[in-house]
Every structure is written in C-alpha cells, then in structure tokens.
Amino acid sequence: MWWPSVPDHVSQDSTVGVYVLGTILAAMFYGLTFLQNLQYFDRYRKDCLAMKFFILVLWLFDSTTMALSMQAVYIFAVARRNLTFATIDVPESVEVERAFSFAVVFMVQMYFVGRIWQLGRRYWYLPAFIGLVSTIAIVTGLAATAQSSAFGLASPHPAWIDGLSAASAALQIATDVMINASLYWLCSMCKHNSSKGVLRDALVNVVNRNVLSTLMQVMTTITYFALRPRLVWMSFHMASSKVHAMSLLSTLNSRDLVRGAAHDAEIADAQIRYRLERELNGAADLPERPPIIPSIHQLRSQSSWFANGAKSAEADDTKSATDATGPGTTSASVSVSALSRGPSVHARSTTAVDGYHGY
C-alpha cells in the first residue's frame, strides 16, 4: 500500500504506537520463519542446490525487511520523538522495506506458480496467467514505491501514484486468491493417505494453500481504507511478507523423507496421473487390431530352401507314382506312395510346427 497523509490531530498512539506494535507482530512471525528455515536446512539436505539457494535468498530478503522495520521504529520513536508525526519525512528504510517486501511476496508467489504447474501440467495456461499477474503486481508496486518516496507524510500524493499503488495491491490479492483456488482444486484430485490428524491437516492446509497470506493482503487493504489515517494497516503490511515466507517453508517442511530424500505425495500422485493419461491417450491413437506378424516357422515354411526342396520332391514323387500305376489309380494309393518318401516326412513336420499356435 502507499503511505497516507497524516493530519496533525492524529495522536501518537495511532501512529508511532501502532507502528511499534506492528513491528513486534512482524518479529513474532519472523521468529517462526527463522525456525522453519533451520528445520529445512537440517532435514532436507539432499534437495537440489537451486532450491537451497532460493530459500537462502528468501531468508536474506525477509531478514532485511525485519531489520529495516526496526530501524524505522527507532527513527519514529527515538531519533525524532520530539517532532510531530505528520511533519516527519518518510524514512528511506520504510521505502526500502516495502521494496524487499514486494520481492519476498513475488518469490513466494512464483514458487506456488511452479507448484501449480507440477500439480496440473495439462492446465499449463493457469500458472502462466497467474505468473503474469504477479509480475505486473510487483512492477507497479515498485514503481509506486520509487515515486512516493519523494513525498512526506503530510504531503498529498499525485493521483497516478495512488492509482499504481492501488492496482498493485489489487493484483497481489487477485494473485493470492487464484493461487489459493488453484491449489485447492488441483490437490483435491490427489488421493493419498494422511495420518497426521484432522485438525493438524486443516491447520497445515490453511498455511500451505496460501490462505493465511491472502487474508493478510485483504486485511492490509481493508484497514487502510477503513481506518486511515491511522497506521493500523502497517501492522498487516509488515507481517504479510513473513506470512508468505512461512507459507512456502511450511509447504516444503511438510514433505516426507524417504531414504533421506524429500518425497512430496501430492506432486508424486499428480505426476503418476499425468503419465497414465498420456499413455492412455497415446493408446487411443493406435489401431484397434495390431498387424499380425508371422512366426519364424511360417517364414521358414514359405521361404526356406529346404521346405521348397521338400515340396518339389513330394510333387515329383506324386507324378512318378501316377505314371507308374496308370491314370486309373486312386488318390489314396498316390498319397501312400508319396508319404513313403523321406523328404515328404520333413515337409509334414514343418507343416505341423506351423500349425502350432502356442508359440
């Protein structure tokens, strides 16, 4: 959100006091993310280096937002405590904290975009659209932050800066809602047994499905418009990046360990279903009846020189038997004379093998 103008009659309790309480709340969430980072690097040592580097950068960005928030509290509550809050220029630490907060939220959203693609590769257009909206949100947010840093708390902002900030907040909320809905829809297709308990599964799903971070974004927007010029919205803003990071780390730390390696049951189930669908679709394109491939015995009986020689010898025997006995001899006597020859026996054995269909 953008920094609102604060009139002189607003008390210190509604400005500096709320800012201090918001920093304490953000520090509590940061403590949870800190423990989750330690748990991740301790348990999942066999994860790829790219994922470890991604978590390390996210941790550094999150720690930077916490340090900058504490510096802003020191400036408001200690260094410039004798000044009226409305006359204090916006500290640079506040604007830099906002930029790093946008970066943390963007990184978490991109991780969930990749997870959506892994869970439903058939619906590739869904993560592509969500990633595009998230990219537009961070670009507009950083642009509004850079332009609003030149104004003080008591100075009104130009309308186009407020419009950029409002558009960024709306796009971030829309991205989180789409991620939440997509994860719920795709994970509902996965069938895997869970033995962690109903209540624990429900609490984990609230965090892993990006529900809690979506609520933080919504509360930041509502409190800004409903309770301005009080800085209640800053409490939710500072905690939003911590909750997003906690959502990502909770998803990673909920994976099972199989021989020391991470095993994600939802992604494994989705990959199996995707492969089966591809195989079934490929089988549907094949002909209904495959071509009949002749056996080796059939090829021998048709093209072997031995079989051809046996057939020609049998034909010669039949002709000679007919000439010897005369034209009046019956076919039975001819057959008996022909079967008495050796080569015809081999020919009959080859024919018998050809007739065996159990090969």
Image (cartoon, grey):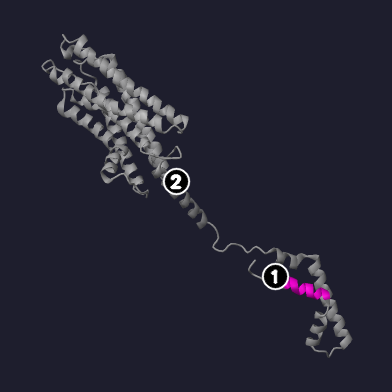
Magenta-drawn stretch contains 134: no
Q: CA distance from mark 2 to mark 1?
A: 46 Å
Q: Name the quarter where the C terminus is drawn.
A: bottom right
Label 1 is placed on what type of residue? Asp
- Indicate left or right for 36 with 259 as reference: left
Visible in this render: residue 282? yes
**Start-end of magenta stretch:** 342-351
Which residue is tagged 1? Answer: 354
Q: Residue at x 45, y 48 (%)?
A: 272
User: Residue drawn at (29%, 14%), measured in percent from left and top?
Assistant: 92
Mark 1 residue element: helix
Secondary structure beneath disc 2?
helix
Q: Amino acid at mark 2?
A: Gln
Q: Which residue is mark 2?
A: 271
The one nearer the camera, 326 or 255, is 255
Q: Is residue 113 above or below residue 351?
A: above
